[in-house]
């Protein structure tokens, strides 16, 4: 006890306490929150009805924007009939849904605390039950190790880079919208984005770009994520804009300093 | 002084040379040539040394690069492109990057040196502009400089197109789109440049010979001329103690300046190597081979072309069709007008200034920028104009990074590009006058010494002491800007011959505004030209006056 | 301009003489040991360093030069030691080669600066400038000589000589220009080339040309391209890798819900809500292909021209002056999408001879 008393005035102490409190809060929330409880119960019972559980989840967390039976609410959220489980998995696992605030576009963020594999599966099952739609791909279907990077690269350049950039660094669209960077996207999310066309993104269905071709593209994108920059710092890999900035900020500044050093005079007291 | 005993290994070859080319006379005159010292006088050397690095690294690259658009299937060591169809040029660039030791380093150093080459020219040119070092007798060297800058832009364009990657291909496509939009000759120019329809199979080879032979050859000749003229005319110097229009004060070429120049070469080379090692540039393997069917978000040209990109982006959609011919103003205007304003403006400025001031004298002492406020303000307005276009050439990256609407960056840019330079002009002009006033205060009243003194009647004052000799000399280097004689004729008087008629009147007006002494150095007591804040200055001056102690 | 001349030291002719030579051969450390020799002579404007500073400078510079020496060796060692052949090893090679080179160059540079600043004297030499212009006498002499030479050569007096020489030069001067002709293609009806794309050609079998997916080359069954909000980059069958053809013929294919299409789109040229537009921007020719399925806007990433794909790809923002041309498409007997004809206006950037092709099409009525 004495040690704690002695250290409680340590500059870091307040952060430690804050973190502890937040952690406790989060932990108790997951215990108390009905979603977590039920999900746990469902799994425990082993005969969970995913659709029913998903419906409850939906009504708690999604219905305020998408309507009580996912029919959509004008000006708030679109209908989810027919978007399929893949859309649910993409939006919820990437933290885009539930939306925090209404903006031009839902940003990628840390998923809500109730989100886990089971809750996503349940929500997905519910939405799938409303009107079908694309389903979540199997792990093997999106395994980057099974794809051909080079072929995927060709398709990626033909269909994706105009918005997401050569290296998946993202890019601006009109009126504040943007194509997000792909640096954190998981193979499953990439696949789901292509088949569901989230937000402004167009759809690339499986009958035109086959699942194998999609796996090639995934292999390329995941390869990019892990590829080191052989030439030094990547400078965001976005090309001339940052290169120009580095040249002026680093290159010219260093040389001006060198020039000053070379020509500097010590003022002589005369 | 036992100077007769020159060591044999030196005296041998040197007398051999002297016997044959009379090198002694030349060296006698030039070994001790004096070079003035100022950090800003080294900026041009950045460009010179970058050029040398470009020649060295570029030669290395030519040993491995294949300037051919022949279609090949890649089978090198970069996995993500294996089996992909591409041009031989692109494949050989990949080979340089991944299969030649030091190839990546040389490629990156070459590209960084190219960026530095142009940046060096730009900062050097700005230094020359703001100090008025382009004035007689150096106008010719200034023109050579402007030509070199234009050539360097073209050299850069032909260079970064060579790897035939998807990014540079976008630049090439835009170049083609601009060229074909030119009235009357557009289609001819493009079909001749590309040997037929875009992209054809010739452009890389053609750009290659332009890039490695023709343009560098011309540049080399112009650089030599530039250096010879500099040598013959001697360098300008900043105003200062003992420095006049008729002398040069500084260090001798041999040994001091030579060593300094050598050191600066090594610095330039070293900074290029530093960037080439630690900052990845133009990673073409990530961009993929060129095809006119694809493009990436955020495709940008190298920074020196950014202002053209920006002006193309800002332009509203104007197009005129007359008598079955098309004039795509939304391409021609942004492609030609800003470039024309900047380059022509630069080239003509020395002559326009001469015309306005009527100043035909030789100038060897550089102006301090504040002492020619209109010139400085015009220069800053130009920089703002150029800089805004440059910035807006990256408006998609700005929009993406700061999450603002892409469309609004354009709307704001359209206004800013006109308003910005005007504001900058006014602000710069006021700042220059303010700095002149502070100089006048230093000359007139001395500098604060930090010593507080109590006067017999109880008032506390800070003791002012005269400025150090060299600082005073630096400030006293100021010269009134000449005005065309007769420009200040009375309104009803008869102006001299050259100032009659509308152009003459304009000249007289401009001359009066541009020239003259706005804030006289030795007259900081408020009865100078009637500027609005002169009264306030006089008040401050009154207190200062009592306190000055000698 | 200051006319404060009193404190300018004027070195005379002694200066160059003093330096042409080097210190006496007896001093083996000649370059760094200037002070020990004859440098004590007091030349105005040459302010020698005191021995202590010089000695310190010598040591620092020597240390830096040694670093350069070692880095140079490190460079050679890295070249031999680190092979390349993939991304990882290229990174390592670049880092070691570049790092040693950087260190070598920067320490050499620093060593030189230390040498100049700490070992060499401080200089304040003054040299006279002379006006650039030659004196009047010289100018007169040159002018006279020039005229005299011209007269001697006879070029002023003998017009025949002069005129034939000028005439002789003219064709020779034009010769190189003539040689440039073959830079361009043999035909000269360039604008005609720009008016057509390969979509106008039928296949060898005399059929309409199929639309195929860029990157895979697979033909597209209309029934498969069935997700509203879908988009595809499309190239002509048989020209998948012909860059010249692609520069004009690349398409974007977009699937709409039929009710989304507006009057600007030629519905006769669509197939069940599938519309094909030229991908080549009408501004300066970048492939315009950023498609937002929510707004139906096509954005060109180069200069941000924005087109409304639901409404005939008319321009809604940016510098492009004309809509993206629409390609007439249909399905063949197997259900694949084909082009039933060429674009009715030239695709891509405007050019002088283009004219208002859109207006002509409107006047000539509906030939669709």
Image (tube, coloured by chain):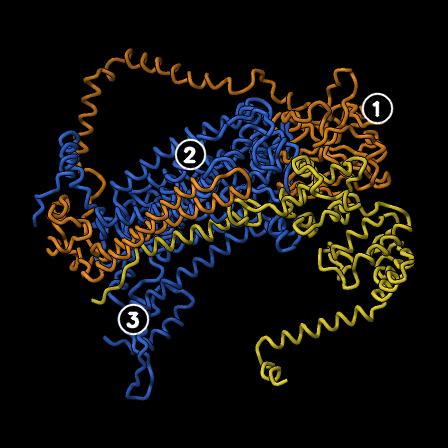
Chain colours: A yellow, B blue, C orange
Whether label 2 touches label 3, CB < 8 Å: no
Task: Indicate whether B414 appears above or below B148.
Answer: below
Name the subunit of mark 3: B
- Name the secondary structure under disc 1: loop
Q: Which mark is residue B446?
A: 3
Name the subunit of mark 2: B
Q: Looking at the image, tell me whether mark 2 or mark 3 is earlier in sequence order.
A: 2
Name the mark nearer the viewer: 1 or 3: 1
Name the mark nearer the viewer: 2 or 3: 2
Q: Nearer the viewer, residue B518 or B268?
A: B268
Q: Nearer the viewer, residue B129 or B88?
A: B88
Task: Indicate whether C366 appears above or below B399.
Answer: above
Reading the image, the residue beneath label 2 is: B60
Give the residue displayed 19% in from the left and 49% down from the top.
Answer: C31
Whether marks 1 and 3 lie on the same chain: no
Reading the image, the residue beneath label 1 is: C332
CA neighbours of label 1 inside 10 A, class few (<14), some (14 to 19), many (20+) = some
Image location (x, y in percent) of residue B181 = 59, 31
Q: Tell me the quarter of the picture where residue B377 sits.
A: bottom left
- Disc 2 to disc 3, C-alpha distance: 59 Å
CA neighbours of label 2 inside 10 A, class few (<14), some (14 to 19), many (20+) = some
- Name the secondary structure under disc 2: helix
Name the mark nearer the viewer: 1 or 2: 2
Specify whether B343 is left or right of C27: right
Image location (x, y in percent) of residue B547 = 29, 78
Specify whether C221 is left or right of C347: right
Name the subunit of mark 1: C
Specify whether B38 is left or right of B282: left
Number of numbered discs on residues: 3
């Amino acid at each position: 006890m004495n040690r704690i008393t002695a250290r409680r005035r340590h500059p870091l102490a307040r952060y430690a306490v804050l973190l502890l409190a937040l952690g406790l809060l989060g932990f108790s929330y997951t215990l108390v929150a009905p979603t977590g409880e039920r999900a746990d119960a469902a799994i425990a019972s082993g005969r969970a009805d995913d659709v029913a559980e998903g419906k409850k989840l939906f009504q708690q967390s999604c219905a305020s924007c998408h309507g009580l039976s996912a029919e959509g609410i004008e000006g708030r959220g679109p209908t989810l009939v027919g978007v399929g489980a893949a859309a649910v998995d993409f939006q919820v696992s990437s933290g885009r849904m539930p939306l925090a605030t209404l903006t031009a576009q839902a940003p990628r963020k840390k998923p809500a605390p109730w989100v886990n594999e089971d809750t996503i599966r349940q929500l997905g099952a519910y939405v799938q039950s409303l009107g079908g739609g694309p389903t979540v791909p199997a792990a093997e279907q999106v395994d980057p190790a099974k794809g051909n990077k080079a072929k995927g690269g060709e398709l990626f350049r033909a269909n994706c880079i105009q918005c997401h950039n050569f290296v998946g660094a993202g890019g601006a669209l009109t009126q504040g919208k943007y194509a997000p960077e792909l640096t954190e996207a998981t193979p499953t999310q990439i696949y789901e984005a292509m088949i569901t066309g989230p937000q402004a993104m167009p759809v690339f269905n499986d009958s035109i770009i086959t699942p194998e071709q999609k796996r090639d593209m995934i292999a390329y994108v995941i390869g990019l994520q892990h590829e080191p920059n052989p030439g030094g710092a990547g400078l965001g890999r976005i090309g001339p804009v940052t290169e120009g900035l580095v040249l002026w900020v680093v290159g010219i500044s260093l040389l001006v300093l060198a020039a000053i050093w070379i020509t500097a005079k010590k003022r002589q007291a005369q | 002084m036992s100077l007769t005993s020159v060591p044999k290994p030196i005296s041998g070859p040197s007398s051999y040379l002297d016997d044959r080319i009379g090198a002694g006379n030349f060296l006698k005159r030039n070994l001790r040539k004096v070079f003035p010292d100022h950090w800003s006088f080294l900026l041009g050397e950045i460009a010179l040394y970058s050029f040398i690095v470009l020649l060295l690294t570029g030669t290395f690259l030519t040993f491995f690069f294949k300037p051919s658009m022949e279609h090949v299937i890649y089978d090198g060591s970069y996995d993500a492109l294996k089996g992909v169809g591409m041009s031989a040029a692109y494949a050989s660039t990949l080979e340089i990057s991944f299969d030649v030791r030091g190839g990546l380093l040389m490629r990156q150093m070459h590209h960084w040196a190219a960026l530095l080459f142009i940046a060096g020219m730009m900062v050097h040119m700005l230094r020359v502009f703001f100090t008025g070092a382009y004035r007689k007798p150096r106008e010719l060297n200034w023109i050579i400089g402007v030509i070199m800058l234009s050539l360097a832009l073209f050299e850069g364009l032909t260079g970064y197109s060579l790897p035939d990657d998807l990014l540079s291909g976008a630049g090439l496509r835009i170049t083609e789109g601009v060229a074909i939009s030119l009235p009357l000759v557009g289609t001819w120019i493009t079909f001749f440049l590309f040997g037929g329809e875009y992209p054809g199979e010739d452009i890389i080879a053609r750009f290659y010979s332009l890039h490695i032979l023709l343009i560098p050859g011309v540049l080399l000749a112009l650089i030599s001329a530039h250096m010879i003229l500099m040598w013959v005319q001697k360098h300008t110097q900043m105003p200062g103690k003992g420095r006049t229009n008729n002398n040069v004060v500084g260090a001798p070429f041999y040994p001091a300046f030579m060593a300094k120049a050598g050191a600066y070469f090594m610095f330039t080379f070293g900074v290029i190597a530093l960037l080439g090692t630690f900052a990845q540039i133009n990673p073409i393997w990530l961009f993929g081979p060129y095809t006119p069917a694809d493009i990436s978000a955020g495709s940008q040209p190298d920074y020196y072309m950014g202002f053209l990109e920006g002006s193309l982006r800002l332009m509203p959609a104007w197009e005129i069709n007359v008598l079955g011919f098309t004039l795509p103003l939304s391409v021609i205007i942004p492609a030609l007008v800003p470039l024309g304003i900047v380059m022509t403006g630069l080239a003509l400025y020395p002559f326009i200034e001469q015309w306005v001031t009527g100043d035909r004298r030789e100038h060897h002492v550089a102006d301090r920028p504040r002492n020619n406020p209109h010139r400085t303000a015009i220069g800053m307005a130009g920089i703002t104009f150029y800089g805004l276009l440059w910035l807006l050439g990256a408006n998609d990256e700005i929009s993406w990074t700061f999450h603002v609407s892409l469309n609004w960056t354009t709307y704001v840019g359209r206004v800013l590009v006109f308003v910005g330079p005007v504001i900058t002009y006014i602000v710069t002009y006021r700042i220059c006058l303010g700095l002149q006033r502070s100089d006048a205060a230093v000359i007139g009243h001395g500098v604060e010494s930090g010593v507080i003194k109590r006067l017999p009647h109880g008032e506390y004052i800070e003791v002012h002491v005269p400025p150090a000799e060299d600082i005073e000399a630096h400030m006293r280097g100021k010269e009134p800007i000449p005005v065309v004689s007769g420009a200040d004729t009375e309104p009803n008087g008869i102006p001299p011959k050259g100032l009659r008629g509308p152009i003459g009147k304009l000249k007289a007006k401009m001359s009066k505004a541009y020239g003259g002494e706005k804030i006289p150095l030795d007259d900081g007591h408020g009865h100078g030209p009637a500027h609005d804040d002169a009264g306030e200055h006089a008040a401050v001056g009154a207190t200062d006056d009592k306190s000055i102690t000698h | 301009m200051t006319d404060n001349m009193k404190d300018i030291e004027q070195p005379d002719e002694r200066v160059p003489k003093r330096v042409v030579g080097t210190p006496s051969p007896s001093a083996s450390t000649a370059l760094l040991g200037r002070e020990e020799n004859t440098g004590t002579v007091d030349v105005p404007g040459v302010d020698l360093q005191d021995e202590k500073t010089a000695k310190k400078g010598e040591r620092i510079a020597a240390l830096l030069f040694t670093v350069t020496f070692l880095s140079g060796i490190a460079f050679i060692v890295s070249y031999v030691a680190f092979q390349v052949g993939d991304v990882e090893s290229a990174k390592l090679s670049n880092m070691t080669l570049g790092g040693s080179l950087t260190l070598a160059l920067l320490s050499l540079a620093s060593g030189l600066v230390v040498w100049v600043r700490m070992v060499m004297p401080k200089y304040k030499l003054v040299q006279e400038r002379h006006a650039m212009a030659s004196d009047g006498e010289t100018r007169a002499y040159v002018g006279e000589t020039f005229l005299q030479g011209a007269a001697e050569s006879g070029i002023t007096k003998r017009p025949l000589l002069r005129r034939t020489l000028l005439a002789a030069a003219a064709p020779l001067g034009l010769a190189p220009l003539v040689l440039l002709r073959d830079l361009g293609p043999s035909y000269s009806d360039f604008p005609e080339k720009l008016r057509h794309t390969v979509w106008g050609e039928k296949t060898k079998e005399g059929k309409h040309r199929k639309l195929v997916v860029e990157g895979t080359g697979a033909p597209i069954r209309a029934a498969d391209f069935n997700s509203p909000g879908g988009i595809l980059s499309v190239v002509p069958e048989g020209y998948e890798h012909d860059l010249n053809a692609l520069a004009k013929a690349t398409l974007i294919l977009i699937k709409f819900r039929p009710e989304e299409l507006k009057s600007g789109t030629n519905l006769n040229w669509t197939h069940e809500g599938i519309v094909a537009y030229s991908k080549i921007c009408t501004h300066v020719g970048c492939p315009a292909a950023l498609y937002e399925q929510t707004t139906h806007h096509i954005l060109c990433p180069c200069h941000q021209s924005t087109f409304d794909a639901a409404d005939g790809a008319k321009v809604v923002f940016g510098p492009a002056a004309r809509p993206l041309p629409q390609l007439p498409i249909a399905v063949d007997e197997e259900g694949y999408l084909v082009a039933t004809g060429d674009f009715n206006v030239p695709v891509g950037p405007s050019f002088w001879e283009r004219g208002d092709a859109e207006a002509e099409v409107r006047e000539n009525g509906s030939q669709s």
